[in-house]
Amino acid sequence: MTSVHLQSFPMARQPVVPGPPPLGLPWAQAEAQAFHLQGVGRFARAERSAAKSRAALEAPSFLAAEQARLHAAHASLCAEAEHWWQALAANDEETVCEAVNTAFSDNPAAGCAVGVDGSVLSVVMRQQDLDAMPTQTPGLTPSEWCAS
């Protein structure tokens, strides 16, 4: 059985890639201290004190480096997202079908995007066969269900 259904959807909006989390000096100091205290025993007071001093000195540069790394990663993600969005907005068949098929991947209805023609996307949906349907539905017998 084949049926065709044309459905219009509202215009999609470009998603926004959230920025990196804000990092502060207390975070950097805690990270640097944890790094420098690795392998230092609890009772090695002089070594612990020296490790904490090194951590305090290195924390600002560690913070700057980590912020730069996160901002570079964010810029890369934004560029990649922009490229994907432009392909999607241009109705690039591979990009559109992949996006729709990913959206269908957690849906119990078996659907698959099969092509794009201009602004029209073709999706094939498999209707449940009688063997996959429940055997009992409140208020309906199986013969009434098939007739409806």
Image: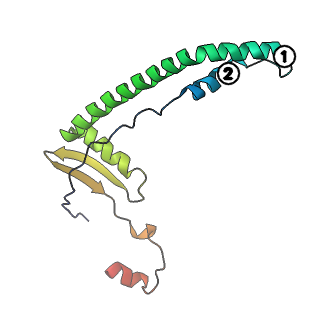
**Element class at badge 2:** helix
Left or right of 10 on screen, residue 35: right
Q: Which quadrant of the figure contains the C terminus? A: bottom left
Between 89 and 26, the residue placed more toward the observer is 26
Q: Provide residue 13's location: percent of width, then percent of height.
A: 25, 46
Q: Residue at x 37, y 56 (%)?
A: 110
* Mark 2: few/some/many CA within 10 Å (<14, 14-19, 20+): many
User: Residue 33: which disc?
Assistant: 2
Between 3 and 86, the residue placed more toward the observer is 86
Q: Provide residue 10's location: percent of width, then percent of height.
A: 21, 55
Q: Provide residue 126's location: percent of width, then percent of height.
A: 33, 59
Q: CA distance from mark 2 to mark 1?
A: 15 Å
Residue holding disc 1:
44
Q: Quadrant of residue 20?
A: top left
Q: Amino acid at mark 1?
A: Ala
Answer above or below: position of 88 versus 5: above
Q: Residue furthest bottom?
A: 139
Left or right of 47 on screen, residue 111: left
Q: Amino acid at mark 2?
A: Gln
Q: Provide residue 147's location: percent of width, then percent of height.
A: 32, 81
Q: Which quadrant of the figure contains the N terminus? A: bottom left
